[in-house]
Amino acid sequence: MRQILLNQKGAIVARMPKPTVGRGSILVRTRYSLISVGTEIASLAPDASSGPDSGPVEKAQAYGNLASQYLGKAVRDPKKAMQRLRALTISRLHALMPVKPVTASKPVNVGGMIWRKVGGGSQQTDGNTLRITTDTTEFGYQSMTDEISIPKDHAVVLEVRGEIEKGAVCIGLIAGTQGPWLGFTTFEAGVFDEKLVFDVEGAKSATVVIANAGHNDPSSLKIEPINVSMVPPAPDGASQNEMDQQGWNVGYSLAGEVVKVGPGVDDLVPGDLVACAGAGQANHADYVSVKRNLVCRVPKNCDLRWAATTTVGVIALQGVRRAAPELGERIAVIGLGLIGQLTVQMLRAAGCRVYGLDLDPERVERAKAVGLDGGASNVEDFKHLIRDVTSGHGTDRTLITAATTSSDVTNLSMEITRRKGTVVLVGDVGLNIERPDFYRKEIDLLMSTSYGPGRYDAAYEIDGNDYPFAYVRWTENRNMESYLDLVSSGRLNIEPLIDSIIPVDEAPATYKALAGGKDTKPLGVLISYPETEMPETDEAVITLRGHRKPQSGPINFALVGAGAFGTSMLVPQMQKQKNQFFLKAVVSSDATRGGNFARSQGIEILASDMETVLGNPEIDLIVIATRHNLHAEQVVRALGAGKHVFTEKPLALSWNELHSVTEAYNNRETDSLLMVGFNRRFAPAIIKLKETITQRRSPLIINYRLNGGFIPAENWIQGPEGGGRNLGEACHMYDVFRSLASAPVASIQAAAIDPVDTAYQRNDNFCATITYEDGSIGNLVYTALGPKKGLPKEHLEVFTDGEAFVIDDFTSLSRAGDETPLWQAAEADKGHFEELKRLGEAIAGGKEAPIPFDEIIETSSVALHIEDQLFGRA
């Protein structure tokens, strides 16, 4: 399918796998979606700081500002937004850095290709191998080839082989001999053998460049002769390289047809016409998967085009509800964009006299055409108008539907509103409010939150829990119903507000025109999608063009879940072991996040459904890094498909889930391995400790203190997806006990602090004591009561044979009385690299898993048993 993304080049139409439909969700084939001219186009508007005379750093900074402007509004978690922003901006910064003028050295011939040293390092040939030691510039060019001619509309393919002996370099193409980057790939330490595909964007010639990749220390590499070939354009005109199709998703209002409903949805069926809302769900795409409470049935006599405006409609409607207008009142609307225009019509329908302000005279006239009683495009004229039509009293209510960082509109609203009046903030405006009018008039200042009650409440939007009708009459979903009723009954006239409807394939050109145009921006622009399905493109898995060269030696693995831990911890640790692992596929329910990661890594397969990779015979290992509540079911499916499985902890959140995993493992038809991410037993400190106490005569006393810090109840870790902190994290500690004791569990006792009248959960603060058959005792103190700074998170004390050992936050291991630590590191090492290394060796060598299956099940059972004790279950 196609999805519109925004990036530094503007809008692009990227290929994506068709989304799956989960519990409480609805799969919708989009017919129309609404471009948010304010938010989406503003994020692409030219900025003075990124003009043609700006330097690369200024341009990258401006791009970062551009991206953050949209990301900050499009996602729930600002920290995650910044992580996404950082990845996009760093890539852009690398592409913008220019070469410093350096005199080229004498050319050398390597396999028929001429290379010239242009950096301050060294370059020499060794037979058919080019050896380069780079200089210390951050992004400086080091070596360049002669110029290569490119046939019209052809793509360039480079087959590169060699080894980065130290550091990292970029290998890619620039336009001509001094033009911008057409593309590059960063290679870090290790052997490489890749096929790089470049869409040259109309360039008639190009030069192969080897450049530094952001390191301040010299890098060294050797590279074999590069094979250069040209690829003619695809018959359908599609790009030969999709790896640059990265960006952030846009769109939050659409209408379409239900294709499939997930479990728990029983009031909609395939074929129903619906309107959908929500950033991150109702995106500009051929297909979307949207949660039930963000979907509303479209009335039979409602034009589907106008139903696509539902999201902005309910934003306006919620603002009107917050204002609570009464018949005959005089109301001001500041800002006459699409939301403002709809607000005017709603207030008129409610029997009010409405007056509007917008700095664009054309918008004022358009509002008058749909019912505005009077308006102005000049602030002073507007003040005079309000004075005259209210007999000097001021408006009864003022709704701000503008978007500006300035506080002027807020203070203007205080000035024009009467005593005891109401001001409602619908738009995103400055809140540096001047006190005199606000205080003297005793004005009520109200915030209108998006679509209405339920917005930003995960229990409502994600879990699908409705609010009782009798107590919350107008939820966001019921607001959607109300808006569509107003549209279908003719009380709202949408057609005059829609300036154009463009096909989805024309979206990039439309965004470019809207962003660059100096004329008045349109009020409403709709994107239309084909009315018939396209079976050849509507699949849950796609092969990305321009992907890295497949590898035959390493273990091919698929990453299931493209969240932070999988992409920033597991994959980097596995990529350090290139001889062991090769990332062939990414499976993610979030097409944008998964697509960005897959493309940034040159991955071959991008899928939304795990089943598509389970049936792929080329994939050996499934790496599961999804939310905790999905682990057991996904492990069962992967084992049933005969795949080796690595899953992040926990293995299971219930006894039934653990039983299903046990059955799947015992009934598997292959010798596939199951590994759970109990990484701490592979930490250097634990390994060294085990070696030191191998000959112990007495049992162990192990005291493990975990100072976890406070996590709010609404965090996913604390809910059904995470299972809480005992099941989700303390399982690590139980595995450490089992590893050190080297004996089965004999007894378990646990008790928790009563969390009544506190913000803590029952499994946030507890003590657990586990005895083992060799007489050892493991005692865990798990607390969220401690400070986040000033005290290490994890601290272990181990006593045996008259000695004591201390592990301090996995940065050191010391023996009581010794001056020198047994092991020490500058940064914590919790064993992620080692656990994956041993897993790779076990798979490659046909050996047993690094953690025996019975120990995995025992540790998981201990966590479940302690959970039962903490909550008083038998």
Image: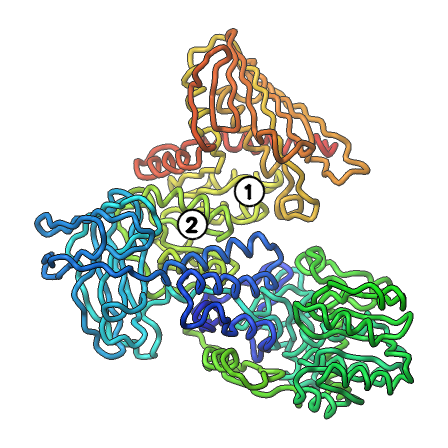
Q: Nearer the viewer, residue 774 or 78?
A: 78
Neighbour tally class for label 2: few under 14, some 14-19, many 20 plus, Cα within 10 Å: some
Can you see residue 489? no
Q: CA distance from mark 1 to mark 2?
A: 15 Å
State the residue in front, 127 or 599.
127
- Examine the image and state in which quarter residue 670 appears: top left
The part of the image, by quadrant, that contains residue 757 is top right
**Which residue is labeled 2 in the image?**
641
Single out the residue that lies furthest toward the bottom: 369
Task: Determine whether, in the image, residue 537 is placed left or right of residue 329.
Answer: left
* Mark 1 residue crowding within 10 angstroms, few (<14) / some (14–19) / many (20+): some
Instruction: Specify the amino acid type for callout 1.
Output: Ser
In the rendered view, would you say 187 is above or below 826?
below
Q: Position of residue 3 (x, y in %)?
A: 49, 71
In the displayed structure image, the side of residue 790 where residue 389 appears, left or right: right
Rendering colour mode: rainbow
Where in the figure is residue 399, as x and y percent of width and height?
78, 74
According to the picture, the residue beneath numbered tag 1 turns out to be 660
